[in-house]
Amino acid sequence: MEESELVDTTRVYGVLIKDNKILMVKDPRHGSRVWELPGGGVDEGETPDQALVREFKEETGLEISDFKEFDQFIEHYYADTEREGWRADRRFYIIKSSAGQLLEEGNGWDTSIATFLPMEGLLDEPIQESMKRPIRKAVQSLFKQ
């Protein structure tokens, strides 16, 4: 597949840390094999901030506020058949405030579980590769405060 054939997309993810634990989710559409940060695609007509609030609520049940972008990169990824591919602008936000009841058993569609995992040893867990760098940066920034 040529780079010119890739579909452009913007994806947003939130890092919520409480009591030295990070909120992570598993997506049943990916076989619930790896942990991911809550988030997803920006819909047409939506700003990245609006998408982050919507995706976080859909996947975790939590309403978020007071968040700030802290990392961003472009990643190319492909469907299993490599007949479809995307150029994803991935944006990551530190979330400082949340409210509501966590949907621990997921939302029945794109989240099968939502839980806080201890920061210590988290990167030894099966985590989606593109999430590792932002998690490291978020944890490092927490300890610099």
Image (spheres, rainbow, N blue to C red):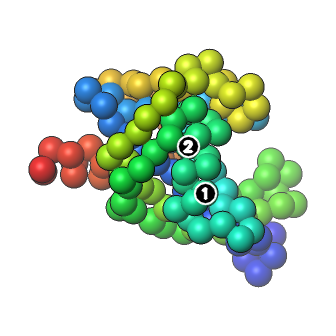
Residue drawn at x 26%, y 29% is 20
Marks 2 and 1, the one that precedes in the sequence:
1
Image coordinates of residue 46 in percent, x first then y, are: 66, 66
Most extreme residue toward the bottom is 4
| Identity, as a three-letter code, of the amino acid under mark 1 | Ala
Dots 2 and 1: beta carbons under 8 Å?
A: no
Question: Dot 2 corresponds to which residue?
Answer: 56
Question: In the displayed structure, would residue 88 be above or below residue 135?
Answer: below
- Quadrant for the N terminus in the image: bottom right
| Identity, as a three-letter code, of the amino acid under mark 2 | Phe
Most extreme residue toward the left is 145
Circle number at residue 51: 1
Residue drawn at x 74%, y 25% is 108
Image coordinates of residue 23 in percent, x first then y, are: 43, 32
Q: Dividing the picture into quarters, in which one does residue 117 lie? A: top left
Q: Nearer the viewer, residue 60 or 70?
A: 60
Question: In the displayed structure, would residue 69 be above or below residue 31?
Answer: below
Q: Seen in the image, is 100 located left or right of residue 45?
A: left
